[in-house]
Image (tube, helix red, strand yellow):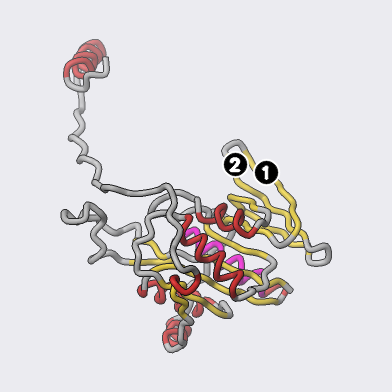
Amino acid sequence: MFNIIVCVKQVPSTETKFKIDSQTSLVDLKEIEWVINPYDEYALEEGLRIKEKYGGKVTVISVGEERIKTALKTALAMGVDEVFHIKTEDRLLDSQTPAYLTYQFIIKENLNFDLILCGIKGIDYDQGVFPISLATLLKIPFVTTAIKIELDSENRKVKIFSELENGTEISETSLPCLITCQKGLNEPRYPSLRLMMQASKKPIPTIEGRELISETPKFNFQINKMFLPPPRKAGKILEGEPQEVVKELVRLLREEAKVL
């Protein structure tokens, strides 16, 4: 049997069209559709598959605002055993603060775990800092980019196949440890409407972030302003004989693009 913790983040849907709030210079959150971070879905699915194969328990933890409860209800509908919401209304713009709050919660509640699974990164800020920060705080081994996980229940070890640019790396470590999950590890399940309805009626245990620590630690990270990239200019199609096209291309690169 394995006790598994899965850390879940809620992020904007990839189909969301972002707007910048002129007053705060941050992303306007009013019209955003929120979903479970896609990489975290692989972690959720893997945790459930391990539980189904070996037995045990899957616990999901998420840090953030009230809206995150919708993600936790989806996790319940997928089949996890329990969920916890660490509530803070702050717009957490760094990844170390949620990692610190999650660490404090695990320690305070004395949660017993063999394995922590996370997505390799959040698709919003694209940092990948949370998992390694949490593993460092817990002082446990950390392996990233898993596309295959093999557990040795007898020897309490795990073998991880990680996707690298030039191939696959195979690592082995003892439990407990933290592993980040990548696309290709599995195919996440979709809960049925009936399970979603059942999950919607379940209470979500909520812990105020300020109850875990008297003051949220300040890290050396701050976002002063956000802005959308400028729209791309329309491309040009050059026609004619090759010699004429090359001559015109060189002129455009020199006079308009100014890269020559």
> Where residue 145 sits: x, y (%)?
58, 50
Spatial distance from mark 1 to mark 2, Cα to Cα? 7 Å
Q: Residue 164: which numbered mark, if any? A: 2
Name the image quarter holding the N terminus.
bottom right
Residue occupying the point 46% across, 82% down: 204
Q: Amino acid at mark 1?
A: Glu
According to the image, label 1 marks what residue?
A: 169
- Tell which circle, 1 or 2, labels the residue nearer the N-terminal end: 2
> Where residue 93 sits: x, y (%)?
37, 55
In the depicted structure, whether residue 246 falls above or below residue 137? above
Q: Nearer the viewer, residue 156 or 44?
A: 156
Density class for disc 1 (Cα within 10 Å; few <14, some 14-19, many ≥20) is few
Badge 2 marks a residue whose secondary structure is: strand
Q: Residue furthest right?
A: 154
Q: Is residue 45 magenta?
A: yes
Q: Nearer the viewer, residue 103 or 186?
A: 103
> Where residue 52 sits: x, y (%)?
67, 75
Q: Which residues are magenta?
A: 38-51
Q: Amino acid at mark 2?
A: Leu
Q: Residue 94: which numbered mark, if any? A: none
* Callout 1–callout 2 Cβ contact below 8 Å: yes
Residue occupying the point 26% across, 47% down: 225
Q: Is residue 105 magenta?
A: no
